[in-house]
Image: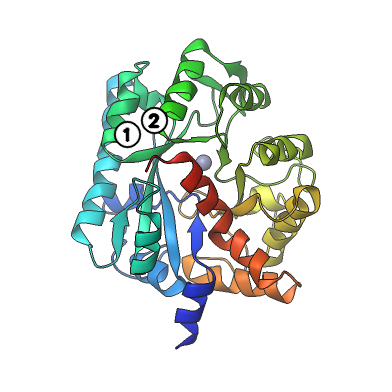
Amino acid sequence: MDERKIRKTTFPLVDGHCDSIAGHVAGEWDLTVGGGRLSLPMLRQAGVAVQFFACFVKEDGKPESLILRGLELVEGCRRLIAENPADLCLLETAARLDEVLDTGKTAILLSVEGGKILGGKLFMLSLLYRLGVRSLILTWNYANDLAGGVREPGGLTTFGRDVVREMDRLGMLVDVSHLSDPAFWDVLDVSVRSVIASHSCCRSLYDHPRNLTDGQIKALAEQGGVIGINFYTEFLTGGKAALEDVVRHVDHVCSLVGPDFVGLGSDFDGCESLPVGLENAGCLPALMQALLDRGYSEENTAKIAGGNFLRVIRQVLAD
Ligand SMILES: [Zn+2]
């Protein structure tokens, strides 16, 4: 058994966030060939079992154009999966998760980043569900008709509460990354399921509104959720960063709440600068090795690599 196979078997990796589909759809890069921050060959090489693909919906523009843009990216993901059946499959149900993990393919979990895709209509959520979308980041940085964002305060609106309840009912992952602090607390209040922060770091290590406070991390853990540590250097240190800085943020979550509530949320192709040693998805095994070298047990490294995300996916998605 070669080393790559061992890594795949021991540590199924889950990356809770990337923005790589936008450039692929725009023709700026081709995810089916190597190079760039993330590609199908890299996912295969690193042993990524589940990759969240975020469909980013801008905040400004006509509502119709925002909806169309979001749907274009959802369709772009679906087409990429359909055209690469040897490498990819769509993750839609908890029941299929083990089967998917056994295939060695990368399962794509479709996510939408920005609640404006709903156009203020709840039926759009179940329509997106039918299209395979299983996670929604309620806002980007600014407030919308669902909630406040990190750069524009506000809690969860009445519509936002309805959206969270409907996501709970459908079996979708409610994602609190990018939310304002009041909206974060409102979501935890309303949702009866485990919520995720797909790509967020620790505010006590670097004071940035996109990072979570210790209180938020504890509350999210109490609810059984998971935090995917973002690789964006701006959130890790505010300046230059290296792979070890991601380890520091992982350490911090573990020291607060133990090893069951932290994972990875790379933000590949969605952030401007990445840590030295974590420039692309092919570097993920090196991060796992760094955790082992730091003294994390194989069991806890596997949880951080993907086990914690897999637990929440199993709990939240329908069978
Ligand atoms: Zn984001």
Write down the quadrant of residue 141 in the picture: top right
* Residue extending farthest top: 158
Secondary structure found at label 2: helix
| Within-10-Å neighbours for mark 2: few <14, some 14–19, many 20+ | some
Residue 277: % across, % down? 60, 70
Q: Amino acid at mark 2?
A: Leu
**Which residue is identified by label 2?**
170
* Residue extending farthest bottom: 1
Residue 88: % across, % down? 30, 61
The answer to the question of whether label 1 and label 2 lie on touching residues, with beta carbons closer than 8 A, is: yes
Between 107 and 22, the one nearer to me in the picture = 107
Write down the quadrant of residue 103 in the picture: bottom left
Q: Is residue 6 above or below residue 194?
A: below
Between 263 and 234, the one nearer to me in the picture = 263
Q: Is residue 309 above or below residue 40?
A: above
Residue 76's label in the rendered image is none
User: How far apart are the alpha carbons under marks 1 and 2?
Assistant: 8 Å
**Which residue is identified by label 1?**
129
Q: How many marks?
A: 2
Residue 35 visible (yes or no): no
